[in-house]
Amino acid sequence: MNEWAIARVALGLSEDEFWHLQPRQWNALIWAWHNKERRIDARIGRICAVIANCNRAKDSPIFEVEDFMPGEEGRERPTKSPEELLQTAIALHAAHGGTIDG
């Protein structure tokens, strides 16, 4: 469901466009979106650094762009259990018309 929400809200895909994507296409779109977001963050970080450096004390350290960018280093990523991964795979398989013969 998280992927669907990202597709609809962040990428602006229609319901039909989302469900007809191949995994390779989905990965390419997400990669491009993340890169776009990083560029936006860098632009905003640059503006913040300029403003902060214009207002800093003479003997204080210079601010860098990275000081104002949300970093991904050290951030814990939520992980799914094997059961959750299986349920996601089954749901995607079924959404694309697949069946599971037991």
Image (tube, rainbow, N blue to C red):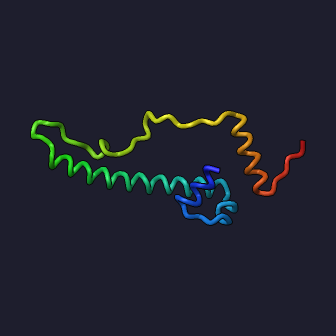
Give the vertical position of 14 relative to 36 (above or below).
below
Give the vertical position of 88 relative to 14 (above or below).
above
Q: Is 86 displayed left or right of 56 in the figure?
A: right
Q: In the image, residue 58 lies at what x, y percent?
A: 9, 40
Residue at (15, 49) in percent of width and height: 54
Locate the C terminus and report the quarter of the image it occupies: top right
Residue at (76, 55) in percent of width and height: 95
Q: In the image, residue 85 lies at what x, y percent?
A: 69, 39
Give the vertical position of 102 relative to 15 (above or below).
above
Number of on-image labels = 0
Nearest the eye: 57 or 72: 57
Q: Is 12 displayed left or right of 60 in the figure?
A: right
Q: In the image, residue 31 lies at what x, y percent?
A: 52, 53
Q: Is 47 displayed left or right of 76 in the figure?
A: left
* Furthest residue toward left: 58
Give the vertical position of 62 relative to 96 (above or below).
above
Residue at (80, 57) in percent of width and height: 97
Q: Is 50 displayed left or right of 77 in the figure?
A: left
Residue at (50, 34) in percent of width and height: 76
Quadrant position of residue 4: bottom right
Q: In the image, residue 32 lies at what x, y percent?
A: 50, 56
Nearest the eye: 25 or 84: 84
